[in-house]
Image (cartoon, rainbow, N blue to C red):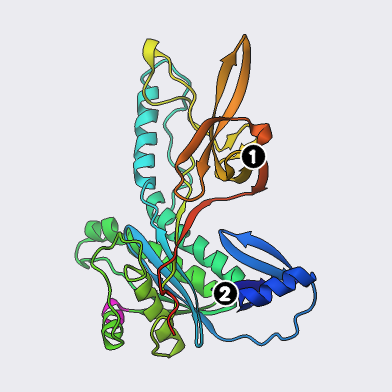
Amino acid sequence: MFVCVLDQNNNPLMPTTPSRARRWIVSGKATPFFKKGIFCVRLNQEPSDNQKQEIAVGVDPGSKKEGFCVLSQSQQYLNIQADALTWVKDKIESRRNARKSRRQRNAPCRKNRYNRSRNPFPPSTKARWDWKLRILNVLRKLFPIAVIAVEDIKATTKPSKRRWNKSFSPLEVGKKYFYETIKSWTSLAIYQGYETFESRNAWGLKKTKNKMAETFEAHCVDAFVLASKALGIAIKPTNLNIMCTSPIQLFRRQLHRFRPAKGGERARYGGTRSCGLKRGSLVKHPKYGLCLVGGWMELVQKKSVKKVISLNSVVDNKRLCQNANPFDCKFKVFNSWNFKFIIKEGAFLS
């Protein structure tokens, strides 16, 4: 395991070992903090050495899961397996149907008008590529990344049919947007799928057929191969631990629930704040310890109304309680990701 190091101006330096980071913290030379679940230290004085090795990040895109690997010529720092954003398309469809139904009822609504903020590709496609960019943006703030290697994906097009190309263009347009953004940050290396396959087999690495498995061999192995090819080295992985992450799904405010309750009443629904706390934030509760903020509700007790919040586990995001007092929760940090670490026995190989 390695610890990310930042200087006084939050510029990334080369990662260090946990023992050295511990000595810095004890002596007051560095301040510890967490960034999206990754432990880091910030130096309180000028670094003794500013030399940096070339670090590459491999990206293996996927429809359900995606792999990221941070690698240098001598060390394998971090493996990330991320869940792809798949719910945006259904949310847009539900919103469209709700607006259509409200226009037929005696309820507050706006008239149908042309979508003035129309993007060159659908919202679901943009959300998928923006999620990859958010992960890479965090990594480039923690590591001195010199190159990002991506496995190219293509959509079948037919030059003679414009309507066919129009329906398949979102993938190509989204990919172009993804590549242009990376080029504005750092160098970009693009490899085809068969190149990754040939290199993986030549190096004796295996990839599991279970794409949903939370193991290094599912997606991170291809990301490792891509990063190695970008650095021009052929080595075997030394770190098989992975960090599984997924974006926290926030339910934006609606007028009411889609389905009415008994009596035809529609309760309120949605929102990103619970009693002054942003949902998904990391808080410390005296009984449950570190947990995530969920939704809130009102409890009627002896002619008085009390607002309570629900708390979720930071390990598996399962609900711990629904009646926590918000004043008992000590705010720690804002959070927009769910994350957990999968530690494999013998993950660090010599």
Asked whether, in this view, residue 280 is left or right of residue 93, the answer is right
Residue at image position (25%, 63%) is 210
Q: Tell me which label, 1 or 2, sits earlier in the chain.
A: 2
Asked whether, in this view, residue 10 is left or right of residue 296, the answer is right
Q: Which mark is residue 164?
A: none
Whether residue 335 is visible here, answered yes or no, is yes
Span shown in magenta? 192-196
Residue at image position (62%, 20%) is 306
Kindly report the secondary structure that dominates the magenta region of the rendered protein. Answer: helix
> In the picture shown, does residue 251 fall above or below 208?
above
Amino acid type at mark 2? Phe
Numbered disc 2: secondary structure: loop
Q: Position of residue 334 (x, y in %)?
A: 62, 49
Q: Which residue was labeled with disc 1?
A: 286
The C terminus appears in which quarter of the rendering?
A: bottom left
Camera-side residue of 270 and 345: 345
Q: Position of residue 27 (x, y in %)?
A: 79, 72
Q: Position of residue 156 (x, y in %)?
A: 23, 66
Camera-side residue of 344 and 208: 344
Q: Which residue was labeled with disc 2?
A: 2
Measured Cα–Cα span from mark 1 to mark 2: 31 Å
